[in-house]
Every structure is written in C-alpha cells, then in structure tokens.
Image (cartoon, rainbow, N blue to C red):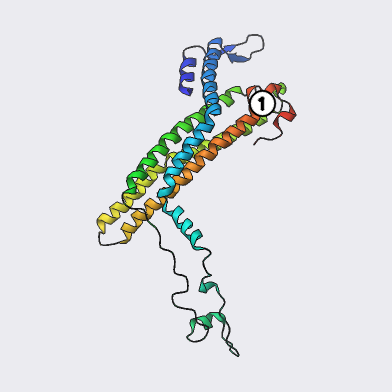
Amino acid sequence: TVSVLYWSMSKAPALKKKSKHGEFQPSPEAEEAVREVKAGLERTLASFMAGVGALCRTYDAKLREALPHNPKAHFFEDLDRAGSPPSSPLLKRPPRAEGSSMSPLALAASPGKGALPAGGDFPPAPLQLPPADNRDRLLAQLRILKIEARGLVNTFEQIHDWIALNVPTLGDESAGPGVEVMGVVISNVSDLTGVIKAVYGLEGKYLGDRVEIEAKLARHPECPSYDRAMAVNDSNAWDEVEKAWRSIIRACLLVHSLLAKNMKILMDPKRSKHRDHSSFM
C-alpha cells in the first residue's frame, strides 16, 4: 500500500508553493493519490472490524487442534488430577535432637534420627515428550501460524497507516486533544504488531535450533542427550505454538476494542470532545 502511494506521488509534482505566504502544500495530484490509498486502507479496516469475531473463532479452532499435541499441557493436567503433591523433604526443617547443638543442616546430613530419606517421598513426574510422528504436525502448525501472522501483520500495518493519514496538521489548535488519542492508538497498534511479528519467526527459530542439535548429534552419535534435546525442542515448540495462537487472539481483541472505543476521534479528531476519549482501552 505504501509503495503504491510512493509510486502515485512520484508521477506528479508532490509539492506546490504558495506565493503569498511562502507555505508548501501537497499538489492536487498527490492529494488524489493519498485519497485513493486511504480508501483502500478504510476497506481493510472495515473488513477487520466486521470479521474479527469469525477471525478469532478460526484462531481458537487452530489453538484447540494444537492443544492435544502439547506435552506440557498434559503434564500440568496430570498433576491436577493427581492432586497437590506432598512437600519435598528438602523443604522440611529436620527436628533438632534433644540436647544436641548440631545445626539442622548438619543433623540432616548425618546418619541416624532426623536424617532425610535418600530418594525423598515424592518422585519427580516424568517429562512427557512428543512422539516422532508429531513433528510433521508441528511443522504444519508452524507454517499455518506463519501464514496467519503475516496476514495479520499486514492488516495491522494498514490500520496503523490509516490512522496516521488521518492525523491533522501538527500544531493546529482546532485539532484539540484528539491528536493525543490518535498517538496512543498508533503506539498500541504498533506494539501489538510487534507481538505478531515475533510469532512470524517461530518456524525459523524451531528449524534453526533443530539443525544445531542434529549437527551435534551427527558429531557425537553415542551421546543420548542429543536425542533427548531434540525431543525437548519439539516439546518447547508445541508450547510456543499454543502461546502464539493465544497471543494472536489477544492482539485481535485488543486492537478491535481500542479502535471501537475511539473510532469517532480517529475518523475526525478535530470534532472530538473531551468526553469522547475518557479511556483509551
């Protein structure tokens, strides 16, 4: 969109000088190009505002597809079903022997009364690692995430540009406090766009980590830790997939809420009143 604007403005003189006051203003051709771009940005904005519900439901369905494959989610579910685990014996203060001046730490380390059990009374729960066939599903989820994140970043950037093109002349007293509201909205949209851009890079990060582990495994095939490292890498990636879908849904809802509450000001900041922007979020 921005490239179209630059191309359109390059085909016509961008500035026209006023001989009376020596001020510069956009030429009619440049203003027409800006209007065309704004019309396209407004269509993107309207589509997002109207379809955000369906969009979030689609993302939620993808989240539910990923949840069964996240071993960390099952790990915490298993702990919930098992109930509260007993306290670790390492966290218990061992009793001081009657008439003894030994410290609790020394008493715990010494044999006899008050010594801690060697293995403790609550063995650690085993880490559930994803099976190897889950890697194809994982890569598929990462690719879908990348596609959806790319589209959402494009939408958020167009919303950002639409607001920026509506900003009135800086220093214009008739604009009132509406300019401040627009600045806050632009800042929040930019921050949430950055969150989605981080999601866009998950596939590359996962593959890069995996290549590094596989290279080490090729040099040291006798070391079992690298096999486990690959499984843990897959487990962490599934957890990141779940978090990414939740982040995307959250970003959509926050941007929609921010725009809906301040739409009158964003469309015409000069007509905004103090009561129209009592809250930004």
Q: Kindly identify the residue that appears in the image at 66 percent across and 22 percent down.
A: 268
The count of marks equals 1
Q: In which quarter of the image is residue 25?
A: top right
Q: Nearer the viewer, residue 273 or 86?
A: 86
Residue 205 in the image: x percent, y percent?
A: 39, 45
Q: Residue furthest bottom?
A: 99
How packed mark 1 is, by other alpha carbons closer than 10 Å (few <14, some 14-19, many 20 or more), is: many
Q: Kindly identify the residue that appears in the image at 58 percent across and 32 percent down.
A: 256
Amino acid, disc 1:
Ile
Q: Kindly identify the residue that appears in the image at 60 percent across and 15 percent down.
A: 24
Residue 75 in the image: x percent, y percent?
A: 45, 57
Is 161 placed above or below 217 here? Answer: above
Residue 249 in the image: x percent, y percent?
A: 52, 39
Residue holding disc 1: 265
Give the secondary structure at mark 1: helix
Q: Nearer the viewer, residue 160 or 21?
A: 160
Q: Residue furthest top?
A: 19
Is 73 placed above or below 92 here? Answer: above
